Image (cartoon, rainbow, N blue to C red):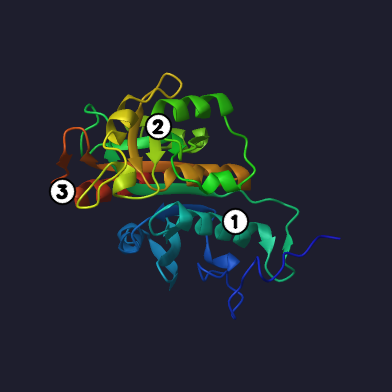
Amino acid sequence: METQIPASELILNSDGSIYHLHLLPEDIANTIIFVGDQDRVHEVSKYFDKIEIKKHKREFFTHTGYVGNKRISVLSTGIGTDNIDICMNEIDALVNVDLTSREIKKNHTALNIIRIGTSGSLQSNIPVDSVVISEQGLGLDSVMHFYNRQGNTELEQSIKAQLGYEFLYPYIENGSTDLINQLNPNYIKGITATCCGFYAPQGRFLKAKGISDDLINKLTNLNVGGKKVTNFEMETAAIYGLAGVLGHQAVSVNCIMANRIDNVFSKNPTKIIDDTIKDVLASL
């Protein structure tokens, strides 16, 4: 007999939908685009040929529809790996748990998850308004340390030693080669660092002082198995890590808004995001 997942762990709303996302299994496609900003959901779905479903709860907005004959969902995750922890577990439950019996399904469904997000460059040769596909995500947050994962211990220890922060335990996760190969081959490929905040955790200070003013330099010069870190943001590594432990395919597409080495910001961020959305939809 299958073991039921308790009501305290798999929380459902009164209509049977999953707790935070407020979605039913039939509400999502097997291809899901993640965006952070809830307003960006419409910026993706406006290119759908048909929209079937529009739902939201809190910051989690979902539109599901069709581009040609392909069914696609777009979901706003909000900011940060804590929200990714919610989104990844709940979309997995929608397809791999029977919400009525609360039992894990015998046949696993693998989802294709494509993040389209904004990011900052950590290298002078990666300019604003370029696009980086994350071959790997370097986690500087803590989410994946709460999961049973297969890590590259030697590489992760090397990264920790180079960064030199006692409180950081970096982890490295891979994107889906299959999904990467579907996307524009002209995009830059690299390693994306995922930070646990926008200000001090990304070496950015307004009034509050941080414990170190050398983070940007350390990340820029970090040796990750012979490669450099190309950019950083706040979601990718957790998406990759949770895709791995839950059995899904994931890729992160990063629109470079800022270059933190040259201290410049895009003069037309809306255009690069819109161009990337259209390009990704065409690739899918």
Q: Amino acid at mark 2?
A: Ile
Q: Secondary structure at mark 2?
A: strand
Asked if 156 appears above or below 6 in the picture, the reply is: above
Element assignment for label 3: loop
Which residue is label 2 attached to?
191
Q: Is residue 105 visible?
A: yes
Q: Which residue is mark 3?
A: 268
Task: Give the mark, 1 or 2, whose residue is nearer the N terminus.
Answer: 1
User: In the image, 100: left or right of 242?
Assistant: right
Q: Residues within 10 Å of mark 1 (few under 14, many from 20)?
A: many
253 to 108, vertically: above or below: above
- At label 1, the amino acid type is Asp
SS type, badge 1:
helix
Q: Which of the marked residues, 2 or 3, is nearer the chain's N terminus?
A: 2
Say which quarter of the image contains residue 187: top left
From this view, report whether residue 233 is shown above or below residue 8: above
Extreme residue toward the left, this view: 267
